[in-house]
Image: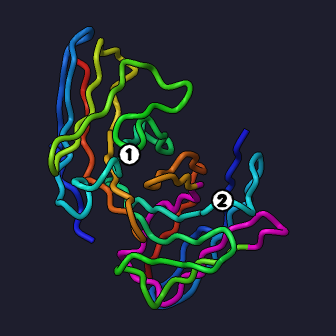
Amino acid sequence: EVQLVESGGGLVQPGRSLRLSCAASGFTFSTSEMDWVRQAPGKGLEWVSSISSSSTFRYYADSVKGRFTISRDNARTALYLQMNSLRDEDTAVYYCVKESRYRSSWFDSWGLGTLVTVSS
Amino acid sequence: QSALTQPASVSGSPGQSITISCSGSSSDVGSYNVVSWYQQHPGKAPTLIIYEGGKRPSGVSNRFSGSSSGNTASLTISGLQAEDQADYYCCSYGGTFAVFGGGTKLTVL
């Protein structure tokens, strides 16, 4: 059974940094592309970032480009999101998501999420 | 990276069928089978219900079906049940980034 467990969320002041982690199990992490998707309180889903299985390719939403960095450690089966220069609008539940890909991609497994609150 | 367009809300009675639309452009929804659909109950994480336009993951009821025409994808839920009341999101992920629709709140009357 696929398990994705996020951690690292909390209350942080604007302009500060936070690092999210995701512990993955139940599948071959080293061959899976992974993503972060967020959801602001009462709002819809927003894709944040993706990383290829070997970390060769990393992509970001325009809203976080230059501030967030996605990374992974295949030996530890862990996914990370380093968030710098945080803004109020980054307040959201952040989901760690496993991606499947054929001719297109889709999100086949989701973690429970970790809440990040950016406020002074 | 513009969001896809979904109706804010739809409703139906138990046993009826409803359809949720998802509109985009030729570079996202209009591309070959790039749309997936997610169901989210309040306070829960989303779950995948349709991928590649019309395929269902194992364990998902065959009451859920997906289709597309031009730049619009659709999710149809037949035989509505109370447990179908949830938020539904479409997503296009055919290239290097994903874009979601704004979400549709389904109310089962």
The residue depicted at 52 percent of the width and 70 percent of the height is A50
Q: Is A43 left, or right, of A76 in this rendering?
A: left
Q: Position of residue B41 (x, y in %)?
A: 42, 36
Amino acid found under the numbered disc labelled 1: Ser
Q: Tell which of B76 and A105 is nearer to you.
A: A105
Q: Tell me the element at label 1.
A: strand
Q: Is B72 left, or right, of B77 in this rendering?
A: left
Q: Position of residue A63 (x, y in %)?
A: 35, 79
Q: Is residue A90 magenta?
A: yes
Q: Tell me the element at label 2.
A: loop
Q: Tell which of A47 and B109 is nearer to you.
A: A47
Q: Which dot marks residue A32?
A: 2
What is the CA distance from the residue labelled 2 to the residue labelled 1? 18 Å
Q: On the rendered image, what quadrant is the N terminus of chain A found in? A: top right
Q: Position of residue B95 (x, y in %)?
A: 39, 66
Coloured how?
Answer: rainbow
Parent chain of label 1 = B
First to last magenta residue range: A73-98
Q: Is A120 left, or right, of A53 in this rendering?
A: left
